[in-house]
Amino acid sequence: MFADKTLTPREAVRLCALGTIVGKPMRYSELASSVRHFISRLTGPSVDLLGTSIELLRYEGLIEAVGGEGMEDDALLVVTDAGRKEFRNLMVAPLRAASDLSKLITALKFRFLHLLDREDREAQVELLIDTSETGLNRLLDLRDSMSDEGGYLVDWLDDEVGRAEARLNWLHQLKQRVQAG
């Protein structure tokens, strides 16, 4: 954890993996695929986040294979008591205010966009539109794949999709303003 007791990216992956199998045992391959799918739909592909090994959770005693199966056998995994305790510790950690570097860079682009010539302004707005469309598509894909899951995730994703759609509409209006001069 960071000094303020918020989760590091590595711990976020641990939370995703543990939370995914707390509700139901899952095969190693299913768990790895589920964690990769979920995280990449929210953050985009990230070696830093997806490099965390599920086998490390087993080594640490947080998950175990049912019936002594080995991980190489695509074992059915369950959370241990220590894993449930770690899951709870990760779940109750406080949140940091949004501090994403990409948010800072986006704000800087908007702050200084007017200093570029018209062609570069148009190209930057198009880049922001493309980036927003990619993010929206990842959210929609995640929402579709999680529609059968209980809990509140789908409600939150619906809100995020609405925000992403509103941002995209705003960017298209900005593009028209930039093109008009």
Image (tube, rainbow, N blue to C red):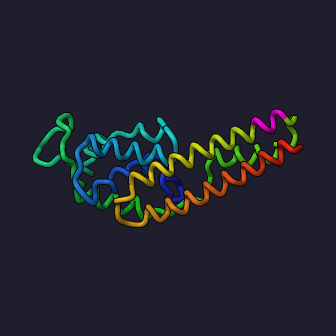
**Front residue of 24 and 90:** 24
Residue 45 % position (x, y): 49, 38
Instruction: Tell me which corner region of the image, top left, top right, bottom left or bottom right, holds residue 179.
Output: top right
Residue that appears at 87% across and 40% down: 115
Residue at the (70%, 43%) spot, across then down: 105
Residue at 42% over, 39% down: 50
Q: Quadrant of residue 54?
A: top left
Q: How far from the left and from the top, in percent, is residue 107?
A: 73, 49
**Residue 91 location (% of width, % of height):** 41, 62
Quadrant in which the C terminus appears: top right
What residue range appears in magenta?
Answer: 119-123
Q: Residue furthest left?
A: 67
Image position of 96 (left or right of 18): right
6 magenta-colored = no
Question: Considering depth in this image, is 54 or 112 the residue closer to the camera?
Answer: 112
> In the image, residue 87 lies at what x, y percent?
34, 59
Q: What is the chief secondary structure element of the magenta stretch?
A: helix
Could you tell me which residue is drawn at 72 percent across and 54 percent down? 170
Q: How many marks?
A: 0
Query: Viewed as shown, does residue 60 lie left or right of 123?
Result: left
